[in-house]
Image: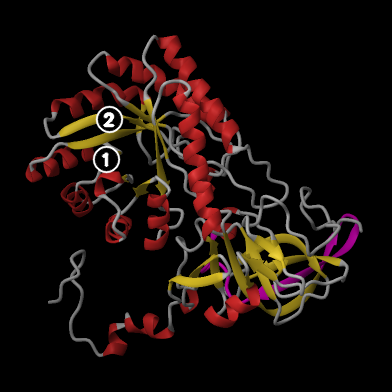
């Protein structure tokens, strides 16, 4: 068939609108003989029958294998140049107690970016010494909680935080290990909202200010300087940005060695994943080898020892392991005038939307979808998967091809939703957030329960007849 003129240039009509593109779906996703999609041996229809719709589903074995694979690839690549590697799982991508325990079991430390994420990791039983805390505006309470718990490292984001963390550590009578987040000025090839090292940026301190900030850190007896921290962005496929950041960081690292030890360099995360069949993802082994070679070359250029390395992948671990299941509600065809004449776009509305996946509305993210409850021989049709919210930008999948007989009641699966979907979810229009279910070895279990209307209404104190009010910032009654 010919491509619909409304389709983006990268999207070609599929030979089979039932097929699952390799690399986009969880490792254990497949079609059962009867036609329904199965995830780790559990059918989509069975999952919705038991846990309701919409539903987040995570392939546990896939997530754990990706975590272990990244760790072993980087450990091997950097061992070859004489460096150790610490891999932090970036909890902001998706964090629950179960997932934190998976990552811990696979030998990863945990990176958190708020007091809530820290509390979750600690409650999950993660050793505080294997937790790192960062963020550009850590509150005094968050700093106190982190220092008091004994977190392994705090990433300092500003001059103010140097003083705050030092004061907290002194009160607790401990020496707190810290890194300094550095804005390298590298322009990563990604969406503007995902690039985190450009000059006009809220994160980190400029390279030109690093030496004086490190001098201040070293002057404070309650702080121990571990090294620099860099994060150039997210959803990055090209290692060129990482290599340029390493070049700039190693130059400053060499200068800092003149004033004392700098045992480690954190080069961040942000490794891209395939959301569609058009995305080309570099094999993790190749990425690890190229980054190790860059670190070794620049260390040799400056005549210094190769530092130990830390990385912080999140999306690359949990993103491909997740799917979201929806139920189709309504369908409408819209005629759109194009240069080639009138073209048809089919709007397929589902029972979720931007409240469970805001990424398409936030920065135009693309996704892949398939009918999950059956197969069809119908000719593929261009569809746009729309949510049920009162926003024209409430789109789940901007463009894909589904069998033309897609109908109300069909179950749709949207791939690669493990990262930044549940963690960015909201209650917009008073929709309850979906449950999160882990699948493994033919069985499913809820790891985060579905919210209910009672959960939403229970926060409204007028409905509860409450006579007390929360004190701002303290949560105490008055």
Nearer to us in this view, 333 or 431: 431
Percent coordinates x, y for residue 281 in the rendering = 64, 41
Percent coordinates x, y for residue 192 in the rendering = 54, 43
Residue topped by disc 2: 226
Q: Are marks 1 and 2 in contact (CB under 8 Å)?
A: yes
Disc 1 crowd, CA 10 A, few/some/many (<14, 14-19, 20+): many
Residue at 49% x, 52% y is 64
Percent coordinates x, y for residue 383 in the rendering = 76, 66
Residue topped by disc 1: 153
> Image height check: is 232 above or below 390?
above
Direction from residue 254 to residue 287 in the image, left or right: right
Disc 2 crowd, CA 10 A, few/some/many (<14, 14-19, 20+): some
> Image height check: is 368 above or below 287?
below
Direction from residue 350 to residue 235 in the image, left or right: left
Quadrant assignment for the C terminus: bottom left
Percent coordinates x, y for residue 369 in the rendering = 69, 63
Secondary structure, mark 1, is: strand
Examine the image and state in which quarter residue 83 appears.
top left
Q: CA distance from mark 1 to mark 2?
A: 8 Å
Nearer to us in this view, 404 or 123: 123
Q: Is residue 348 magenta?
A: yes
The magenta-colored residue range is 335-358
Examine the image and state in which quarter residue 380 appears.
bottom right
Residue at 35% x, 36% y is 204
Secondary structure, mark 2, is: strand
Residue at 67% x, 50% y is 23
* Label drawn at residue 127: none
């Amino acid at each position: 068939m010919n491509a619909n003129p409304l389709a983006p240039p990268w999207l070609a009509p599929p030979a089979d609108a039932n097929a699952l593109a390799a690399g986009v779906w969880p490792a254990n996703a497949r079609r059962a003989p009867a036609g329904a999609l199965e995830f780790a041996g559990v059918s989509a229809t069975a999952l919705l029958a038991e846990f309701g719709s919409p539903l987040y589903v995570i392939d546990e074995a896939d997530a754990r294998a990706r975590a272990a694979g990244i760790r072993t690839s980087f450990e091997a690549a950097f061992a070859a140049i004489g460096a150790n590697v610490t891999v932090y799982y970036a909890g902001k991508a998706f964090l629950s107690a179960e997932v934190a325990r998976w990552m811990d079991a696979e030998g990863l430390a945990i990176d958190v970016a708020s007091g809530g994420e820290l509390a979750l990791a600690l409650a999950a039983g993660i050793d505080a010494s294997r937790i790192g805390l960062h963020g550009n505006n850590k509150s005094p309470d968050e700093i106190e909680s982190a220092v008091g718990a004994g977190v392994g490292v705090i990433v300092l984001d500003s001059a103010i935080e140097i003083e705050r963390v030092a004061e907290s550590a002194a009160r607790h009578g401990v020496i707190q290990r810290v890194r300094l987040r550095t804005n390298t000025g590298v322009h990563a090839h990604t969406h503007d909202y995902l690039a985190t090292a450009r000059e006009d940026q809220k994160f980190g301190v400029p390279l030109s200010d690093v030496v004086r900030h490190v001098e201040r850190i070293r002057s404070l007896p309650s702080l121990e300087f571990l090294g620099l921290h860099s994060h150039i962005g997210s959803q990055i496929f090209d290692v060129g940005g990482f290599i340029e950041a390493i070049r700039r960081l190693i130059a400053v690292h060499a200068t800092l060695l003149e004033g004392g030890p700098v045992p480690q360099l954190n080069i961040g995360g942000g490794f891209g994943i395939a959301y569609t069949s058009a995305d080309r993802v570099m094999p993790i082994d190749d990425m690890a080898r190229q980054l190790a070679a860059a670190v070794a070359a620049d260390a040799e250029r400056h005549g210094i020892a190769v530092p130990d390395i830390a990385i912080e992948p999140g999306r690359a671990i949990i993103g491909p392991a997740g799917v979201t299941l929806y139920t189709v509600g309504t369908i409408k065809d819209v005629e759109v005038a194009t240069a080639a004449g009138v073209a048809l776009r089919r709007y397929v509305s589902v029972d979720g939307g931007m409240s469970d996946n805001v990424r398409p509305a936030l920065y135009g993210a693309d996704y892949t979808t398939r009918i999950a409850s059956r197969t069809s021989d119908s000719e593929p049709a261009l569809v746009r998967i729309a949510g049920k919210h009162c926003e024209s930008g409430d789109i789940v999948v901007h463009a894909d091809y589904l069998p033309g007989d897609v109908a109300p009641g069909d179950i749709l699966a949207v791939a690669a939703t493990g990262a930044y979907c549940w963690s960015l979810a909201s209650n917009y229009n008073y929709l309850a957030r979906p449950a999160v279910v882990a699948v493994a070895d033919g069985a499913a279990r809820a790891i985060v329960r579905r919210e209910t209307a009672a959960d939403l209404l229970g926060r409204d104190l007028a409905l509860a007849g409450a006579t007390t009010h929360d004190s701002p910032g303290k949560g105490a009654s008055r």
